[in-house]
Amino acid sequence: MSSITADAVKSPASAVKLDARDAQQAASALKSVAVAAEEVASGVEAKRKEQRIVRAVPYPFVVAFSAAGFVIAAIINLVFPQVAPVEFKQGQIWIFLLNGQEAYLFLLAVLTVLYVVIGVVDGRNPKDAARFRYRAQFRFVAGLALALWDVTGTKLQVLPQPFFPGPSQVMEPFVTDGAYVALNTFYSVRLFAAGFASGVILGVLTGVLIGWFARAYYWVFPVLKITGVIPAVAWMPFALTLMPTPFIAAVFLLLICSWFPVAFLTAQGIQSTPKMLVEASRTLGAKTPYILFHVAIPHAMPSIFTGIGMANSLSFLTLVISEMMGQPGGLGYYIDQAKAWSAYNEILAAIVVMAVLFSLIMKLLEVVRGRVLRWQKGLVK
């Protein structure tokens, strides 16, 4: 009896002690949440304030400001004296005879007109106009950066030469050897398209297979894990030996490096399909093929496009390496040739082409992703 009474006395005391501890923890958690909310609110308010300041600037001024950096770069190129002795070779672009410096000025003029036209067109749509405003400062600074590069790399040549040529010298290969640059660019695009497309298709098929069927997962996923972590260039000696042509060998390497991320993330997306959706579909009379193509694969689409984006970066890297090590053409082959002659302006010209190509490919993937996943708009932001 005394034991029961003692327990009865202890229980309320311990309960009060636990309640006090829980209350203290809850208060601490609420305080942390309040601090975090205050920080988020202050950040949002600062961003809104910045947006209000930007919107206060008249839109025509924003358009002019975007192009002003390139105009300044052109003026500096024309006004600043050529101190360092630089010889500009002349070549032909279409019907125009230009040297490297004239080609650089022509590029600045094209960029100026291009951004003015884009600004005028985007001004018709408030959403496009807001996006154009957002990038205005970057465009202006990009023009100033070109001007600084021109002065230090071409006019004064204070940068170590011939390793850091100026923009006029980088434009020279497009004028004097434009057809050869275009030919190698076409070779790279063809090789990339063949290898990347094959890898993406095979990756999606493999991911759906191992993500939906348990037996396929048991047998194929270990192979995927083992081969996926091996760099694609490690297979190059085998590819060059076993494949009938260097082009097919390079396609195989691109296929390998793009197959792994697409297959892995596709399988994850398929496996993460909510069981509730699958069971609801079965209850409504849907068969397995219908559930796979109308429930599981659409649910995995965000993961699939994430894998495609990763595969794009890996494939482009593998493309350049494979072209440097055994291809009869391509931008990597062009860089390797230029390196042998210490033509660093040609190397930088090829790098510029690569940057433009990669940006265009990323933009294309972004457009396709936005089209396929248009139902996601508004869910994240």
Image: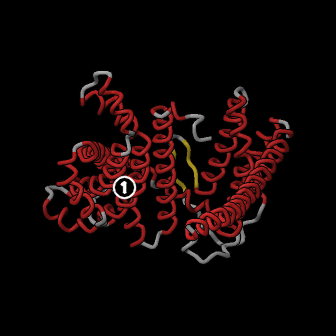
Q: Residue furthest bottom?
A: 160
Q: If the image is split into quadrants, where does the N terminus sit?
A: bottom right
Q: If the image is split into quadrants, where does the C terminus sit?
A: top right
Q: Position of residue 227 (x, y in %)?
A: 24, 62
Q: Is residue 376 above or below residue 11?
A: above
Give the labeled residue for mark 1: 315
Residue 144 visible from this viewpoint: no
Q: Residue furthest front?
A: 1
Number of marks drawn: 1
Q: Secondary structure at mark 1?
A: helix
Name which quarter of the figure residue 318 lies in: bottom left
Q: Nearer the viewer, residue 19 or 349?
A: 19
Q: Nearer the viewer, residue 331 or 169?
A: 331
Name which quarter of the figure residue 111 lies in: top right
Q: Amino acid at mark 1?
A: Ser
Q: Nearer the viewer, residue 352 or 50?
A: 50
Name which quarter of the figure residue 36 lies in: bottom right
Q: Residue sitting at 39 percent across and 39 percent down?
A: 274
Q: Position of residue 72 (x, y in %)?
A: 77, 53
Q: Residue sitting at 77 percent across and 63 percent down?
A: 80
